[in-house]
Image (cartoon, grey):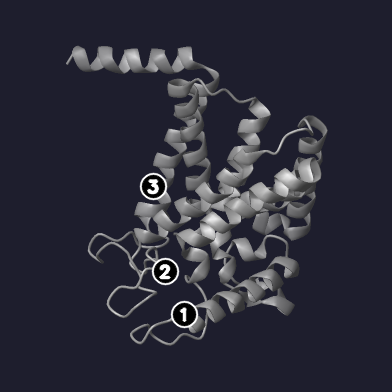
């Protein structure tokens, strides 16, 4: 899927999960915690595509996420792509094809999602509030680049960076400093997993089974059949899926902050169905 769809799916997953925890388990969060978690999960849903590099010196090409912070994130994507390709080359089996780039390899696996989730939790737990600020700055930038793609493209990476810094400073000023914030790591990991699920419904697929060998292959791409696959950038993705994500997000927000309104909507829908 395209960057905006990935980011929106991450935000939707976090908001829906937040509502479910509140509704079924009584786990309440502050509005700021919900907002930060949503931003981080949306950013995490773009993180795997940092393995698609572009033209660093020209600030061109690469995935949506790779252009978030201009040449700095493009350079990071170049490094991550080479590391991913190295892991692929070092671990591939006899039936895995040779590759010249690392896109949709290591960063598109469940171990990567677990690793960055654990790493985020470790940083937050050991370095506290200031590590959280750095994580929020980075992930907010990715989220802004994905959720507001057209605006971010017009505004440029400097404005996106400034907005990310403002969000991080606001977070620093309002979050208590005596916690480990384990939910941040969970939000990053969930975002990465949501990204994998989004790519699985395309024809290219992802190596979701890695590192489990299957038929002398370690990097088998798993995806839906071509007849059922979502075309990247097609109307199913940009209209149907994105509309569904927006509707689910709005319902989740209503359920979290105005549960009475959501109950009214449910009762109205039930009354309309009963009257038919």
Q: What x and y, as percent, mark residue 70?
A: 73, 66
Q: Which residue matches tag 3?
A: 241
Q: Is residue 145 left or right of residue 13?
A: right
Near-viewer residue (212 or 24): 212
For label 1, count other residues whose C-alpha is less than 10 Å away and answer few (under 14), some (14-19) or many (20+): some
Dot 1 and dot 2 residues touching (CB under 8 Å): yes
Q: Which residue matches tag 1?
A: 91
Foreground mark, 3 or 2, reads 2
Name the residue: 62% across, 72% down. 80
Q: What x and y, as percent, mark residue 128?
A: 77, 42
- Mark 3 or 2, nearer chain start: 2
Q: Which residue matches tag 2?
A: 211
Q: Is residue 175 left or right of residue 149?
A: right
Name the image quarter holding the C terminus: top left
Dot 3 and dot 2 residues touching (CB under 8 Å): no
Q: CA distance from mark 1 to mark 3?
A: 35 Å
Quadrant of res 230: bottom left
- Mark 1 or 2, nearer chain start: 1
Please tell me whether mark 2 sits on a helix, a strand or a loop. Answer: loop
Q: Is residue 72 left or right of residue 255?
A: right
Task: Give residue 53's mark.
Answer: none
For label 2, count other residues whose C-alpha is less than 10 Å away and answer few (under 14), some (14-19) or many (20+): some
């Amino acid at each position: 899927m395209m960057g905006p769809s990935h980011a929106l799916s991450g935000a939707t997953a976090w908001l829906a999960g937040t509502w479910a925890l509140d509704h079924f388990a009584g786990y309440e969060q502050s509005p700021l915690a919900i907002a930060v978690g949503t931003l981080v999960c949306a950013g995490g849903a773009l993180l795997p595509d940092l393995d698609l590099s572009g033209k660093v010196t020209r600030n061109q090409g690469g995935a949506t996420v790779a252009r978030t912070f201009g040449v700095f994130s493009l350079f990071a994507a170049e490094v991550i792509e080479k590391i991913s390709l190295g892991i692929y080359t070092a671990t591939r089996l006899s039936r895995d094809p040779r590759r010249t780039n690392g896109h949709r390899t290591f960063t598109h696996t469940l171990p990567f999602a677990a690793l960055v989730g654990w790493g985020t939790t470790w940083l937050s737990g050991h370095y506290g509030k200031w590590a959280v600020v750095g994580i929020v700055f980075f992930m907010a930038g990715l989220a802004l680049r994905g959720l507001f793609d057209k605006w971010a493209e017009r505004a440029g990476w400097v404005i996106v960076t400034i907005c990310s810094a403002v969000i991080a400073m606001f977070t620093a000023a309002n979050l208590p400093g005596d916690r480990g914030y384990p939910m941040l790591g969970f939000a990053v990991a969930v975002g990465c997993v949501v990204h994998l699920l989004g790519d699985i419904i395309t024809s290219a697929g992802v190596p979701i089974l890695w590192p489990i060998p299957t038929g002398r292959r370690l990097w088998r791409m798993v995806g839906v059949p071509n007849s059922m696959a979502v075309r990247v950038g097609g109307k199913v993705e940009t209209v149907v899926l994105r509309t569904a994500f927006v509707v689910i997000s709005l319902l989740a927000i209503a359920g979290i902050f105005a549960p009475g309104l959501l109950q009214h909507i449910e009762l109205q829908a039930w009354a309309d169905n009963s009257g038919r």
